[in-house]
Image: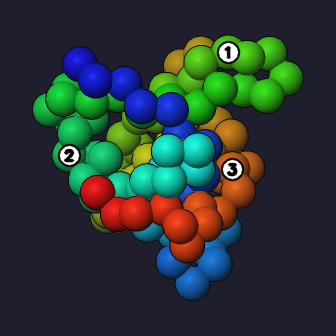
Amino acid sequence: MKQFEITCITRDNKGRSHADISHIGNAIGQWRITSANAIAQISIKASAFFIKEKRTGDVLYLAVFRDAGKAPCLRILRNENWSDELLSLPECSPDCLDY
């Protein structure tokens, strides 16, 4: 399984929830993919996406969060609890290319 570090996000309409994240990406590599593509890759176990926690350096993996009646979205599953670290990432720059 391929693994990719995520360092930035893009939000639709500058929303503040996980459902508003339209893309995840890597600012150093200057790439991003849609959340829908990442959800599909995670679901079939083709790829894993992670962030590194700034304080501890821990690797935290993105997972698909499913809430009844809503579209699936990406979140961090940490110690069997959903967390909000993904929302703390900066916006991807316009230089990040879509894949």
Residue drawn at point x = 53 percent, y = 40 percent: 6
Q: Against 83, is 24 above or below?
A: below
**Element marked by disc 3:** loop
**Element marked by disc 2:** helix
Q: Where, by quadrant of the figure, is residue 13 drawn?
A: bottom right
Q: What residue type is labelled 1?
A: Asp
On the rendered structure, is 61 left or right of 27? left
38 or 32, which lies in front? 32
Q: Mark 1 points at which residue?
A: 58
Asked if the residue at tag 2 contacts the one at tag 1, i.e. Cβ–Cβ closer than 8 Å, the answer is: no
Residue drawn at point x = 62 percent, y = 75 percent: 15
Of the 4 image quadrants, the one containing the N terminus is top left
Residue drawn at point x = 68 percent, y = 40 percent: 85
Q: Against 17, is 43 above or below?
A: above
First reached walking from the N terminus: tag 3 or tag 2: 2
Q: Residue furthest left?
A: 44
Q: Name the residue under label 3.
A: 89
Q: Name the residue under label 2.
A: 40
First reached walking from the N terminus: tag 1 or tag 2: 2
